[in-house]
Amino acid sequence: MRINRTRKAALRRKYHVRKKVFGTPDRPRLSIFRSNRHIYAQVIDDVVGATLVSASTRTKGMRDRLPNGGDKKAAQIVGEAVAKQAIGVGIKCVCFDRNRYKFHGRAKALAEAARKAGLVF
């Protein structure tokens, strides 16, 4: 039952991160999810339980621009897109929820692109 152990370990890492990161109306949470083919980012207000802004490589505008949605370049583009949308809504500060992923590779590329586009975290 190796898959079961792997899933349990992933959930343990996720809960370890979520225990410390909480999104408020003043400083919502920037949460990411990545699969082998795509990457997704959401800005979430945990008090209300609502997604304020979202961007992913599966949206119509992104699919046309990206030949591959599962690489660092795609993560950078999604990071810029989510930052522009968040700033357009009036969100400048967020707390970064890396979910269960290490802060390197695509997660780091998305975060740095969002910072470069103007988000503070």
Image: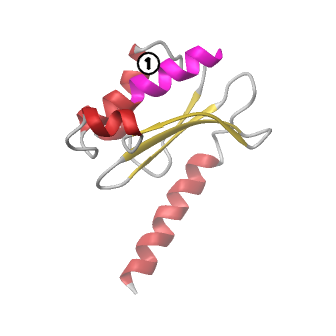
Residue 6, image x and y in percent?
A: 41, 72
Name the residue furthest right: 48
Magenta residues (range):
79-91
Which residue appears at 31% of the width and 40% of the height?
63
Residue 25 on the magenta segment:
no
| Viewport quadrant of the C terminus | top right
Outermost residue toward the bottom in this view: 1
- Please name the predominant secondary structure of the magenta segment in the image: helix
In the picture, measured across the screen, residue 73 lies left or right of residue 8, that is left
Question: Which residue shows up at 36% across the image and 41% down it?
Answer: 57
Does residue 91 appear in the picture of this structure? no
Q: Which residue is at a point 45% across and 79% down the rendered structure image?
A: 4
Q: Secondary structure at mark 1?
A: helix
| In the depicted structure, whether residue 1 falls above or below residue 56 | below
Residue at the extreme left of the image, as rendered: 67
Residue 21 sits in which quadrant? top right
Q: Is residue 86 among what the camera can see?
A: yes
Residue type at mark 1: give it: Arg
**Does residue 84 belong to the magenta stretch?**
yes
The picture places residue 46, in percent across and down from the top left corner, at 73, 40
Q: Nearer the viewer, residue 29 or 74?
A: 74
Q: Position of residue 33 (x, y in %)?
A: 45, 48
Pointer 1 residue: 115
Q: Indicate the position of residue 99 as horizontal and vertical percent values.
A: 50, 48
**Front in this rendered view, residue 80 or 106:** 80
Image position of 3 with respect to 91: above or below: below
